[in-house]
Image: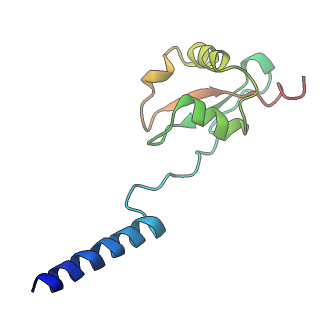
Amino acid sequence: MRKLITAFIIILVLHTTYYDLTTGTLATHRQASIPVNSNQNDPKQSYITYEVNAGDTVLSIVEKTNGTIPVSIDTVVEDFKELNGIAPTRIQIGEQYKVPSYKDVDSQ
């Protein structure tokens, strides 16, 4: 009986490990939200409106919307505060925020 229980536990561990590695048990990360609004008239104030998903941070959102972050992190934080009036640590899941767009910074 002891061998049967040990074999069952080993099979269970192998199965759950396989399932976690192939399918996963955590919530999947949704695709980046489609920009709802963008202001490209003034390059200094250009932004994309983004709906925050679980696990998003301001830096990860800027990377998703811009590809890379061509400016310093301090600049991103200050621009986010200026656009939204709140600190990046206060973002809420499901809310929409203006995310600075740095598409024109690469060409300068």
Which residue: 35% across, 75% down?
Answer: 15
Residue 39: image x %, image y %? 72, 27
Q: Residue furthest left?
A: 1
Residue 21 image position (x, y, % from top left): 45, 66
Q: Residue at image x 44%, y 42%?
A: 54
Q: Tell me where residue 90 appears, x and y as whole percent.
A: 43, 22
Q: Nearer the viewer, residue 77 or 53?
A: 77
Quadrant holding the C terminus: top right
Give the residue at x 45% y 27%: 91
Residue in the foreground of this view, choosing between 21 and 84: 21
Above or below residue 16? Residue 73 is: above
Q: Answer above or below: position of 28 versus 42.
A: below
Q: Residue at x 15, y 80 (%)?
A: 5
Residue 12 vs residue 39, the one in the foreground: 12
Task: Tell whether 85 sits left or right of 107.
Answer: left
Query: Which image quarter holds the N terminus?
Result: bottom left
Q: In the figure, 40 relative to 4: above or below?
A: above
Classify residue 27 as left or right of residue 31. Answer: left
Frontmost residue, 78 versus 15: 15
Residue 3 visible in the picture? yes
Q: Could you tell me if residue 42 is visible in this image?
A: no
x, y percent for residue 40: 78, 27
Q: How many marks?
A: 0
